[in-house]
Amino acid sequence: MYSKEHGMNDVKNMRTAIAGLEKHISLNQIAKRSGINYVTLMNIKKEKSKRVTDSVKARFDAFLASFDPTLAPAAPVAGTVAKKKPGPKKGAKAAVKKAAPKKRGPKKGAKKSVAAAPVAAASKLDYTSQNLGQVLDREIEIAQARLEYLQSLREIEDDFQRAVGRK
């Protein structure tokens, strides 16, 4: 592909570019917007990486070309502390109560709440969408795939039970 020296130059160039970018945008935001892993960017910044892959270099170059520092919110300056929200006082301790012993057995109305749970809550459908038919088709495909998966699990379980001699 390319020589080691070329890869090392890429890392040096990326490191200097990251240092310049951090005046305008945080490393976390660079990671989110560029699609490069945050840990990878940290390793480049802290000189732990000796080379970068072509895909990381391409993503970084694309981000660098599209980044506009005038539109980016200012990154917090290192060493400054954000204002803290007032919280509970350190000296005051909450009164500790002994918990009442729990009663054993099922909770009252447990069967009712299970039966009343809506089935469609698992999938988030947008009923106001213009393309509701497409959304429903996609949901049906997902449900069919789940059904096939569960059937294959049942077959695997049956085979296991037969092998063990329980069926």
Image: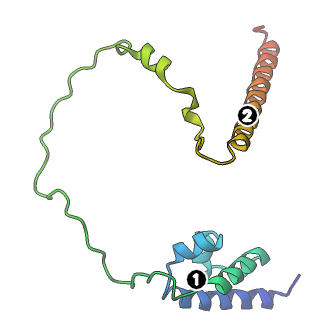
In the displayed structure image, the side of residue 27 where residue 157 appears, left or right:
right
Q: Earlier in the sequence, mark 1 or mark 2?
A: 1
Q: Residue at x 60, y 76 (%)?
A: 41
Residue 20 higher or lower than 59, as above or below: below
Tell me where residue 126 sits by quadrant. Answer: top right
Of 60 and 5, which appears nearest the observer? 60
Residue 133 higher or lower than 34, as above or below: above
- Colour theme: rainbow
Q: SS for tag 2?
A: helix
Tell me where residue 113 sits by quadrant. Answer: top left
In the displayed structure image, the side of residue 4 where residue 43 appears, left or right:
left
In the rendered image, residue 91, in percent from the top left (x then y), is placed at 10, 57
Residue type at mark 1 is: Lys
Residue type at mark 2 is: Ile
Q: Quadrant of the N terminus?
A: bottom right
In the rendered image, residue 107, in percent from the top left (x then y), is placed at 36, 16
